[in-house]
Image (cartoon, helix red, strand yellow):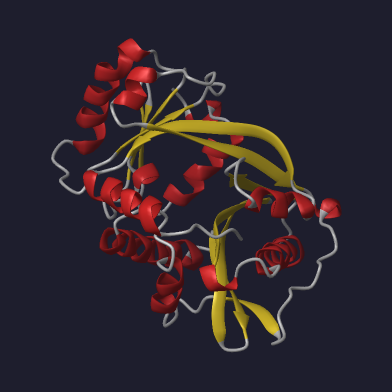
Amino acid sequence: MKIAELRPGWRTDFLLHRVDGEIIERDDCIVVLTPGNEGFYWGNCLMIADTPADADLAHWLQRFDEEVAAGRPGVRHVAIGVNSAVPPEGALPAWRDAGFELIEMATLRLFPGQLRTLVEPRVKTPWRLRPIDFSKDIPAFVDLQCEDAQGHEPPGYRRFRDAQMRRFAQLYALGLGDWFGLWVGDTLVADCGLLRDGALGRFQNVLVHPAWRRRGLCQALVHSVCRWGFERWGLTELLMCADPADVAIGIYESLGFERFDREWGLQRNPPEDAAARRSQRLGLDAADA
């Protein structure tokens, strides 16, 4: 299987692996390894071409162990991306019974002339966007990102986010991307990354602090970073992947992004994340952007 054969969302995911990722093209799959961050699920995964059958479960678990997990104690998950159309509802019962969750994402794109006018955020204090200063800002950004651990075990999620920001610092040093924060007054309230490959840009991890959601700040962040990419970097296309069932996708579409493809995969979290998700379902409310 070849990277060039991947759907646009999956293919641009690989932009994140250009610094320290290892990509191996096998006959039956693509192997993705991130030696410096074993807890990065989709940086330590397999990509396969077609929807697996229930009878394939044992085979792909063995292949994941052989290619990704063997000898790497920090890999406690299983992540398998699938390059085919999303399976019908109710498919893959054996995989679901084995603890796998079907992860589906819509792929959206935006061209310069499609970016719509920003509706100003509903905040009284002036807001501003600026890139991160990687020499001193990483801890503050990691604190923001860990305000919502998204169902993951908190200490492990913090290690993962810290490693990801340090990886982004390397991408920035090579001119391959940047990370942006939105401040209201002196308070960092939202952030996201933007990777670039020639004239193509790909958003990463759009997030708003739970206490600052529903005020238009997500739209302000994405709009400002779109303008940055088009005007300062000369990008001619921006891609975004988003959960089609999440409220945030409507925010992106309100700015002019249009859905044109989708991607999906199978993910089984480690036991500590499963416990964290049970706690979240029992007592925590998820807030939208």
Give x and y (percent) for residue 259. 71, 38
Residue 8 seen anywhere in this rendered image of the structure? yes
Residue 156 sits above or below residue 121 on the image: above
Quarter location, residue 280 = bottom left
Quarter location, residue 129 = bottom right
Residue 206 appears left or right of 91: right
Give x and y (percent) for residue 46. 36, 31
Residue 35 sits above or below residue 90 on the image: below
Count of picture labels: 0
Q: Residue at x 27, y 59 (%)?
A: 156
Quadrant housing the N terminus: top left
Residue 180 seen anywhere in this rendered image of the structure? no
Give x and y (percent) for residue 201. 64, 52
Give x and y (percent) for residue 160. 33, 59
Residue 247 appears left or right of 286: right
Q: Residue at x 32, y 14 (%)?
A: 56
Q: Residue at x 35, y 31 (%)?
A: 100
Nearer to us in this view, 82 or 175: 82
Residue 14 sits above or below residue 65 on the image: below
Q: Residue at x 62, y 88 (%)?
A: 185
